[in-house]
Image: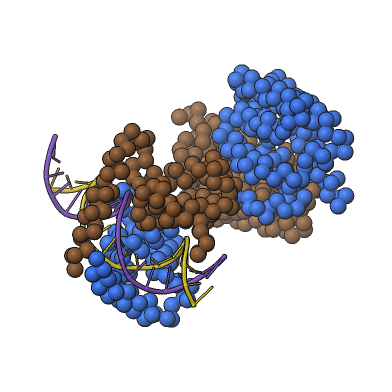
Chain colours: A brown, B blue, C purple, D yellow
Amino acid sequence: MNLVQTPTLMNQISNGVPAMAEPTRMRRARGLVNTVVENLSNRIRNGEIKPATKLPTESEIMLQFDVSRTVVREAISHLQANRLVETRHGIGTFALSPQENANFQISNVDFETVADVIALLELRISLETEAAGLAAQRRSPEHLKTMQNLLHDFETAVQNEANTVPSDFAFHLEVAKATGNRHFADLMTYLGTMVIPRTRVNTDNNAPEGRLSYLKRVHGEHETIYNAIHNQDADAARAAMRTHLSNSKDRLRKAQSEL
Amino acid sequence: MNLVQTPTLMNQISNGVPAMAEPTRMRRARGLVNTVVENLSNRIRNGEIKPATKLPTESEIMLQFDVSRTVVREAISHLQANRLVETRHGIGTFALSPQENANFQISNVDFETVADVIALLELRISLETEAAGLAAQRRSPEHLKTMQNLLHDFETAVQNEANTVPSDFAFHLEVAKATGNRHFADLMTYLGTMVIPRTRVNTDNNAPEGRLSYLKRVHGEHETIYNAIHNQDADAARAAMRTHLSNSKDRLRKAQSEL
DNA sequence: ACCCATTTGTCCGTATGTATA
DNA sequence: ATATACATACGGACAAATGGG
């Protein structure tokens, strides 16, 4: 059974040679796979391998780098993971355009300090202020109905001392939906999934006035926003939304300065 | 040399058995890798393997599914590509929370019609109007200097009949950077990489006034924005940016109605 | 400070199936 | 129908990182 060892041993030897022969290379690329990945990544990114064109075949890459098939396949697997290439069975591997990789992301480190949360809130102010204005112009009767239901849900949650976050967020999301512009709702949804699970800061208890009066004020601000959207008054809707979110921002700033 | 065939053959047989033994399973998972990937994916998504907890070791997975390590490693590679797990050398592979997967993306189908481009422009109005206001409050002398340089670059490009898009976009991006809030610049960068490569619609030639006078007007609008930011007049900066982008939107609407 | 077991990472080889031209 | 190239498996050996004793 272990007769297989013989070729393996030989390979280990012929393997060690090229790895040691280039110690002058950038020390970052520690392994053969990494070397191949970085080389191909760079060639794709700097345009030497243009999008939608075929990469060299696996055997050609094997020869170019003097590595085994496994290394090449592992390298291509990494490139696929990074969305730099796409492999089509029996044809070859093709470079993808960098656009198809790009996205907008907020990482976990963006939630560490109060200043981080304020920065996110500024983005929300930017997004939602305009969304409220557009919603005032374009809302359908169905949008208004849903908003009203959500306002009612919020009131119920306040009275029952239940969690108000879901109906609060749902109201804001419905405003975004009422713009008729997918992107507003999409961005809001994304921000919601990022922000909601971390309600350490900016909780009800941060309000000096006490939970109940704070939530009642929030509800009142929501109603002001709703009325402006209902009356198709874009300027008033924008102003109401800006006031609403700016209040949260001020509260956070106060909490920050008290630390 | 070809003595190696013996174990391989045996494996092929013992391999075929479990694959055929469960024809009742969902027919989608054709390969062994797919089987492992789906099983682990499900266990992560339905919470059986909780976020931040360790998956079984590679050897354990090999035994559980009766597959080789190659299959296991390939499967884990797929899970990494889907951002479901993260592997730490010498420790193990850990499940990630779904949040870490979420992102905001604009797909290619969002560029097909003029209405799509208008929708994107509305998002830009939302983002950049507020960014201009914040920039007016927070811009550093370096920001102002860079903006001035970019305005000059734009003028030069106009005179040389060169491509004005890079300096145009760079100016807008610099405004976003001057907010001091990473998210504004990040989102602008993302939108830029998505929009810039597709300058079919909204090209200079769409302007009825002719390329030169159109570009001169754009330059004038940029200067108005710059002056407001320079004078730290947030309201004026917001208004100037809104006017600037609303002009583009109007031009697109006109082009759309003429189709 | 060191070793050691565990676990993943890197490397090699081979056989066979499958899709495309 | 053949040749080419990729897909999917198997196997083994050694390197490197980590954590505990």
Of residues A136 and A43, the one drawn nearer to the viewer in this rendering: A43
Q: Measuring 55% from the left and 48% from the top, which residue is drawn there?
A: A101
Q: Is residue B140 above or below residue B60?
A: above
In the visual, does A133 lie left or right of A89?
A: right
Q: Is residue B167 above or below residue B15?
A: above
Q: Is residue B69 above or below residue B151?
A: below
Q: Position of residue B136 (x, y in %)?
A: 67, 25
Q: Measuring 45% from the left and 71% from the top, which residue is drawn there?
A: B29
For the image shown, how many numbered marks are present on the structure?
0
Q: Position of residue A94 (x, y in %)?
A: 54, 54
Quadrant that contains the N terminus of chain B? bottom left
Q: Position of residue B239 (x, y in %)?
A: 76, 31
Residue B181 seen from this side? yes
Q: Position of residue B134 (x, y in %)?
A: 64, 29
Of residues B218 and B249, the one drawn nearer to the viewer in this rendering: B218
- Image quarter of residue B140: top right
Q: Measuring 39% from the left and 61% from the top, which residue is drawn there?
A: B75
In the visual, does B11 lie left or right of B180?
A: left
Of residues B115 and A53, the one drawn nearer to the viewer in this rendering: A53
Q: Measuring 45% from the left and 29% from the top, which residue is drawn there?
A: A259
Q: Is residue B109 above or below residue A207?
A: below
